[in-house]
Amino acid sequence: MADNGLTVPMTMSERAAAMQPCPIGTHGFCCKNCMMGPCRVMTEAKRSVCGASQALVAARNVLRFAVGGAAAHCGHAQHLLDFLGMPSPRDYVRERAPRYLYELWDRVGLLPSEDGAGHFFDLSEAMHLTTFGVSGDFRDVLRWCLRIGVIDGYYGLYLSSELERRMWGAPIPTRGPVDLGCIDPSRTNVALHGHEPMLADAMVAEARKHDDVNLVGVCCTGASLLARHGVPLAGHMTLQEEVVRTGLVDAMVVDVQCVMPSLSEMCECFHTLLVTTSEIARMPRALHLPITDRASSAEVARKVIAAARGRRLERRPGVEEEFRRTVRPPAEALVGFSETNVDARALYEQYRRGETKGFLGVVGCVHPRLDADAWVDLYRELGEDHVIFTTGCMGFEFARRGLLDGERFFHLGSCVNNAHMAEVFGAIAAEAGRRIDEMPFLVSAPMPVSEKAVAIGLFFAALGCTVHLGYPHLFGANASVASHLNETLESLFHSRLLLCDHPRTLRDTIAAGALDSVSAGDG
Ligand code: XCC
């Protein structure tokens, strides 16, 4: 029930159930890159008005997805640089990437422009080449997809993770409460949601001054808050509206990415103060308090917490009791792992002794149209003889079920912290004296939602990991795109894309040797 008689809007899951996705767009067959269409190129034989084949349309759509994702991650890193007053690093890929990969990427034209923030020009060029009448070669468009994957990995994931570490220090193994039940009916609840960490420190410091304030995290900002400060994690992306709908969140502060536009209406139905902090992520009816540096973040934290304590007085009578009656207590999760505290040698020894068949990175989003329980059940089963590393919203799914034990299941942080995963894989491979592509590494995004998941998948494929996508249509619907991409991956990186949308199929594919290195024997 709303606080004020307004009709409570539907949540994401309810909207997804009420509306079918467009089958043409789902498969990447819709081209709307000019105004002669949109063209629905439904068969290999058909051409769009401009003459584009289905493979070209599908490949351009994959590239535009990848660019969207990489722009988000690189923007995240750039906002951190701006906040810290630092220039964009030069030759960052050369400094961070394994030498053999750097040389390979250089040879096949996948390295970004490395002069200052030149990678942003590459993102722009990728948009340019997919605009009407530029690239007509779907194979070259797919090569650009891999280039964008490399940019995403280093100028997005790695750079963001490194700057976060500089600001906050390395994460350390920490236990903390996870799930809606960490909202505290007897205190003022302030939720911090999004991805960028500029406000986090200041909010933690400010909240600690007030015993009556319970700070909770949502989404990737929440994953970082939990790993670095032990701040409870209330929900992942698909739960953000539920967090507000408890009627107990007195303020919600959002920055960028995975923040649903519906939050404005949802917050309006309750007494929740919605605060935006990023110039590029404004919301109607929200209070905008921009953050540009440490001084402004301390000031914003002070203002938000003061306003939230005032708002608490506007809660609907009886809402606290209702919450205590209906919401189960939170689970406890062990988080805060990274390459600095995962024992790569011990994990490699487990593998050498046959106690572990391989290493799975389970990453990315939770999709409102897909069955999270079924996927988690699969990884629970695979966790019996594989080690599982996880990040982002999938990490929350493991956490809320009490699976994160720091022995078989390791939580490596937010989605940009997939850089931790790449480093852990590199460290395990180094223990084995092998390259990444020679090891049984699989990165699985079973329920991708955001364009960011596409960019992350391409990055890991370029590193030499097998990559699974559980929502395969964009990559898999056109046979030429799927087969050319896999031929390229196998020949250059000894990696491949597994495109399957059913947990049982993935289990059978792994049992049939999907983690065996494509390059086994030639290392
Ligand atoms: Fe996806 Fe990243 Fe967003 Fe969750 S939060 S929905 S991108 S898994 Ni990072």
Image (cartoon, rainbow, N blue to C red):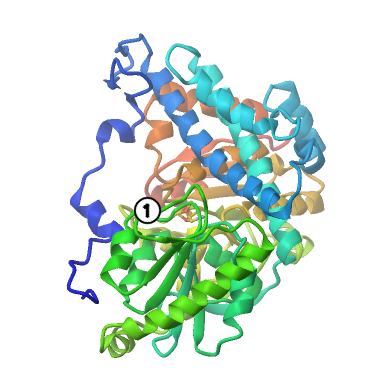
Q: Is residue 44 left or right of residue 499?
A: left
Seen in the picture, residue 251 relative to 125 is either above or below; the reply is below
Seen in the picture, residue 144 relative to 513 is either above or below; the reply is above
Q: Residue at x 42, y 64 (%)?
A: 377
Residue 409 appears in the picture as rendered? no
On the image, numbered disc 1 is attached to which residue?
367
How far across and down, in percent of the image, does residue 130 sit? 47, 21
Q: Residue at x 38, y 22 (%)?
A: 33
Q: Is residue 95 left or right of residue 175?
A: right
Q: Residue at x 19, y 52 (%)?
A: 18
**Quadrant in the rendering for residue 148:** top right
Q: Is mark 1 within 8 Å of ligand 1?
A: no
The residue lying toward the viewer, choosing from 504 and 190, is 190
Q: Residue at x 49, y 40 (%)?
A: 498
**Quadrant in the rendering for residue 300:** bottom right
How far across and down, in percent of the image, does residue 192 sit? 50, 67
**Quadrant in the rendering for residue 100:** top right
How far across and down, in percent of the image, does residue 257 sit? 48, 51
